[in-house]
Image: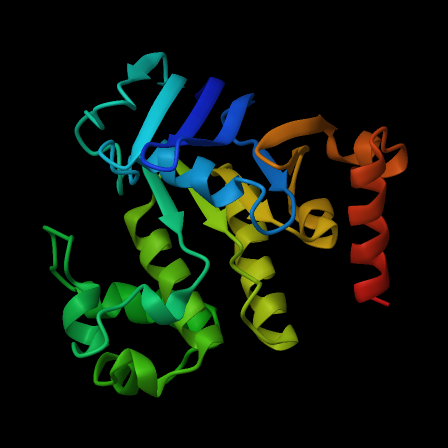
Amino acid sequence: MLEVKDLKITARYAKKEIVHGISFSVGKGETLGIVGESGSGKSMTSKCIMGLLNSRAFVLEGQIRWKDQEINISKNHLPDHYRGKQITMIPQNPMTAFAPMVKLGKQLKMGFSDTENFDGKLSEILKSMNLNDCEKIFKSYPYELSGGMLQRIMIAITLLQAPELIIADEVTTAVDAASEYQILMELEKLKKKGTSMIVVTHDFGVAAKLCDKISVMKSGKIIEQGETKKVFASPQHEYTKQLLEASMLFRR
């Protein structure tokens, strides 16, 4: 479905290459994990796929193909319904994903042309994620809810759009253990339904739970990639081994 080939991202004014010619693909119903530490280029890659990088600030090179259609990444000319209906991104910081001075009920409807029975459909999804007081959520401002609640609301909006590919960018980083468990459960349900996903994370434990294959990034390069089980069982790069050990230590 998605193919990224020789992708380079350069900060135009700093003249610094952030992502150095990386390549990967995601098939239908497949989950790819992009694993690496902060600053490795994972989120920049995700934003480039979504067409969220300003070409005035970044030089974008390489090729992105979506269902055999080439995306013009240098000019951000995207096909109809590419962003949102076909590919959706769950951002890593839910606290900044919403407008702080607009109640959630109002802003959750933004971007949806069909709002018939919107509240009922969204309420049903929210309840499946243990968010039962939907009326209170709709009347709340974002700052009145926890990060874990806002992250699950972001996932609920994603489910409502029913995209073909979901990019989940560090969705468990800023939440507590209980919220992390619920979020991972929801992503597992999506995986079982056949939704394609890219899971961006620094945690091999999350990748092992969700991903069919992984690409390990360091300093803007993919240094190792393959089937998750094989990389987990026999990592070839020293950095991959360090990430694995850190993930296991954290989860003990």
Residue 8 spot, x, y in % from top left: 45, 23
Q: Residue at x 53, y 41 (%)?
A: 42
Q: Is residue 60 above or below residue 171?
A: above
Colouring used for the render: rainbow
State the residue lying farthest toward the front: 14
Q: Is residue 79 at least partly visible in the picture? A: yes
Q: Is residue 26 at least partly visible in the picture? A: no
Q: Residue at x 64, y 49 (%)?
A: 37
Give the position of the N terminus as an image quadrant: top left
Query: Which quadrant would residue 120 be assigned to in this image?
Result: bottom left
Q: Residue at x 84, y 57 (%)?
A: 248
Query: Which quadrant would residue 222 be assigned to in this image?
Result: top right
* Front-lying residue, 62 or 79: 62
Query: Which quadrant would residue 149 be assigned to in this image?
Result: bottom left
Number of numbered tags placed on the structure image? 0
Give the position of the C terminus as an image quadrant: bottom right
* Front-lying residue, 155 or 61: 61
* Front-lying residue, 18 or 16: 16
Residue 229 spot, x, y in % from top left: 80, 35
State the residue lying farthest toward the right: 234
- 127 relative position to 236: left or right: left
- 229 relative position to 115: left or right: right
- 61 relative position to 122: left or right: right
Residue 126 spot, x, y in % from top left: 38, 70
Q: Is residue 85 above or below residue 114?
A: above
Q: Residue at x 40, y 31 (%)?
A: 15
Residue 188 spot, x, y in % from top left: 59, 51
* Front-lying residue, 64 or 10: 10
Q: Is residue 204 above or below residue 127?
A: above
